[in-house]
Image (tube, rainbow, N blue to C red):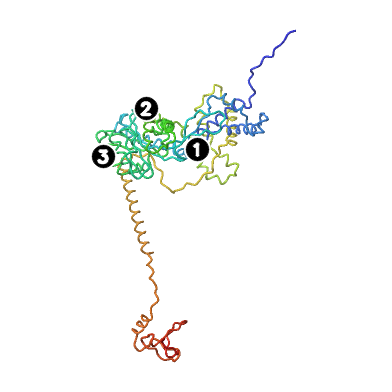
Amino acid sequence: MVVVHRVASYTTPKLVFNEEQEEALVEYIIRCCHLYYGLSITELKKLAYEFARKLNIVYPANWDTDHMAGKSWYYGFMLRHKNLSLRSPEQTSLNRIKSFCQENVDQFFDNYSAILETHKFEPHQIWNMDETGFPTVPTKFGKIIAVKGVKRVGQAASAERGTLVSMALAVNAVGGFVPPFFVFPRKNMQSYFMDSASPNADATCNESGWMQQNEFVKYIRHFLKYVNSSRQKPILLLLDNHTSHLSIEAIDLALENGIIMLTFPPHCSHKMQPLDVSVYGPLKGYYSTECKNWQTANAGKALDIRHIPGLVCAALDQALTPANIKSGFIKTGICPLKRNAFTESDFVQASLSGQISDVAPIENALNEEERRRIFPMGAACQTFSKSTKPSTSATTPTTMSRSSSMASVLSEIGPVQPAMPQKRSNRGRKPMKSTVLTSIENIAKLKEKRQKCEDAKKKKEGSTQKRKRSYQIEPAKKRTQPTRAAASKKESSSSSDEDVDFCMICMENLPAKLTKNNSIECNKCQRPFHLKCVNMSLS
């Protein structure tokens, strides 16, 4: 008798979507990620369930129970597409997303190229300066070893909410840097704040703890100690256009010492500023580690603002390497100059914002279902399709129509749906652009603006003082009851032909001077009478 052993077969499991449909899903996921609205695992599984129902294809029965795809499908999908991975996103504000556009970037590089053609700066003469904050309670800690199965694992912190100390730092394109400059949130500067800092670091203080115009003037003086610039040997300083940098005193000081200041476009520093791109990210991680090590070595002691400079300087020794600094200048296209450092895919969200605003005139003529379909994903789809690998097979019109129809289906059922366009408001500060702060035109504008502010302030103070004088209330005079002698004296000073009063009993005139010997007052009406008329005599 022959015994036949069953051999397990390694056949490919049956897929829910075919290759073309899964490719459309991948393109939609990448598109949403580039639009800063990436999908989570749950959102992807729900999208797969709705996509399968829309295409009327067979899917497992348990999908209807949970109204989403199962875990096995998700893991298989991620294994089949190695170009996708689960990442932790960074929060990016809408102002940053919309402001980073081709127009703003081109304007910055136009100003930057014009300066380079005029002054021929070397890499060691190109500097970048920026501020960042360090709290006494870091927001992120690394993982620790704990008992398995415990739901909550705690970590000691100095307070519920930390106090923030800001730091200004400047680096150049060859990897050099200027010692840090700290701003403490205190009214008066204390010497022990900098006991743990590096010897060349400097500091100041104000109530907010952030850089303001007065503190920026102090920082420029600190910066000049280490750069050795002059009118004969100028340098270029790149920085953002925060209002603290628009100080006329600081700009005049920079001009006297040969510093040319160029600002980045507003809300674009996360992409275009070398310090934000390659230095501050590792620095914050090293700072959190230093804080954790300090807390471990000083158990039961609270971390104070006087400890921050020492911890920051220790983190700077690890993060502020020449390789990190130079990679930031290279990636942003500043040194060496590379105008096409940013591709079309980097400006997708800004371009889509413009297209959405163009839909506003026709939105009232459409119903709600048609409005949901107004999402210019087609342009983004073409943009991202350029970056994908070219297909070896020939693309037929039928294939293109099917892929476009699937893309439209995903745009309709997908979780990313645009809000209705809003009217632009004229309130607030006018949008700024990349500007050469040390140019004659910009200085004239700043002086004119400051003069207007001073005039408006004086006018407001004058109107306030005038209003106070007009509404000033005189203090009320104390009302007193006049005595009988004062009343009789007042009455005697009147005309002599008129008597003061007459007696109501005998109807004869009362004497001009009333005394207790010749008159008496009624207790009710307070009128005087003759003493003899009321048949009373003095006791």
Asked if labels 3 and 1 touch by Cβ distance under 8 angstroms, the answer is: no
Front residue of 28 and 152: 152
Q: Which residue is mark 2?
A: 321
Circle 2 or circle 3, nearest the eye: 2
The image shows residue 297 at horizontal and vertical percentages of 42, 31
Can residue 488 be seen in the rendering of this structure?
yes
Horizontally, residue 15 falls left or right of residue 88, namely right
Kind of residue indicated by mark 3: Glu
The residue at which mark 3 appears reads as 256
Q: Mark 1: which secondary structure? A: helix
Whole-angstrom CA distance, mark 2 to mark 1, is 38 Å
The quarter of the rendered structure image containing the N terminus is top right
**Who comes first in sequence, dot 1 or dot 3?**
3
Label placed on residue 192: none
The quadrant in which residue 332 appears is top left
Residue 69's spot in the image, x, y percent?
Answer: 62, 31
Q: Earlier in the sequence, mark 2 or mark 1?
A: 2
- The residue positioned 54% from the left and 35% from the top of the image is 377
Mark 1 lies on residue: 352
Q: Position of residue 380 (x, y in %)?
A: 51, 33
Q: Amino acid at mark 1?
A: Leu
Q: Badge 1: how crowded within 10 Å, few (<14), some, or many (20+)?
A: some
